[in-house]
Amino acid sequence: MNLRAAVTLASPAPASAARPALPDAQTVTAVTHWTDRLFSFRVTRPKTLRFRSGEFVMIGLLDDRGKPLLRAYSIASPSWDEELEFYSIKVPDGPLTSRLQHIRPGDQIILRPKPVGTLVLDALRPGRRLFLFATGTGIAPFASLLRDPETWERFEQVVVMHTCRLAAELEYGRQLVEGLPDDPLIGDMVSGRLLYYPTTTQEPSARTGRITDNLATGRVFDDLAIPTIDPASDRGMVCGSLGFNIDMKAILEGWGLREGANSDPAEYVVEKAFVG
């Protein structure tokens, strides 16, 4: 059963609590459990870490043999944030998430300070509209980009499409998006320029259906009263499961968009490291 209210843990552990000797250790500062399958957490930021909004790093814990168990996690906080935020699924038998979901403030995790990734503004050609397509925890890199002033300086309008199975699973993204107009740094930039289109696939909600279906049928354009995607002025970023990414590539290329990279900017990019 999904929790209907997020539970946040923000009380630090006692200073005397024993801490494991982790390589590249950072300290957990807050944990929020959004549902029984989803949680987010914040950790201290290495003083030497510089990253572009939308990039990911390797984080993890030690396994039973004392060896680092690492996975790629998109940084959900913007590049200017003093801490780092991550958003994760809980997998009961997952090698890492079965352990990671139990972290509490004051605990330590491993964080390798070498950010990389394709979901960065530098990989896109200049345009007018930016479409962000995400399923599940794929919203994480967009949580970073949406809070970065550079996104709003480069694009006149941003359209966020986020799909989850259940309405409760949309809550992290909903609170993020709805809080942007009140953000002291970018609130004035966001006003009137952000369109949000959340949908569910396994539970009735205000809007339902997969992103791919709502694009293919044109429903999203009718609902938001906006023009269909135009490769001359529209840019896209995709982050979801492998199957979703493949389907989205076909849809976007059907409209004439080309996949870009850091070394060769184009009209859309896909996060190849994210699967879930």
Image (cartoon, rainbow, N blue to C red):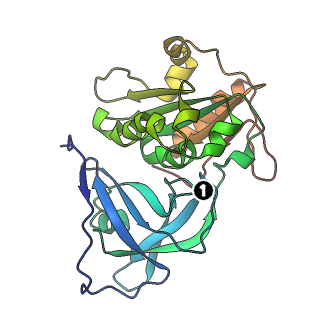
Decide: is 42 above or below 181. Answer: below
Q: Nearer the viewer, residue 16 or 103?
A: 16
On-image quarter of the N terminus: top left
Image-based side of 238 in relation to 70, left or right: right
Decide: is 158 above or below 141. Answer: above
Q: Nearer the viewer, residue 47 or 271?
A: 47
Label 1: how many residues lie within 10 Å, few (<14), some (14-19) or many (20+)?
Answer: many
Q: Which residue is mark 1?
A: 55
Image coordinates of residue 61 in percent, x first then y, are 40, 75
Image coordinates of residue 110 in percent, x first then y, are 45, 75
Image point 64% across, 28% down: which residue? 251
Image point 59% across, 70% down: which residue? 49
Decide: is 99 above or below 21. Answer: above
At numbered mark 1, what does the secondary structure look like: helix, strand or loop? Answer: loop
Task: Determine the residue located farthest toward the right in the rendered image.
Answer: 264
Image point 35% across, 67% down: which residue? 29
Q: In the rendered image, which quarter is residue 4 located in?
A: top left
Counting labels gives 1
Image coordinates of residue 105 in percent, x first then y, are 29, 69
Task: Determine the residue located farthest toward the left in the rendered image.
Answer: 1
Image-based side of 230 in relation to 223, left or right: right
Decide: is 241 above or below 99. Answer: above
Identify residue type, mark 1: Glu
Image-based side of 275 in relation to 124, left or right: left
Q: Nearer the viewer, residue 146 or 132?
A: 146
Q: In the rendered image, which quarter is residue 151 located in?
A: top right
Image coordinates of residue 7 in percent, x first then y, are 22, 52
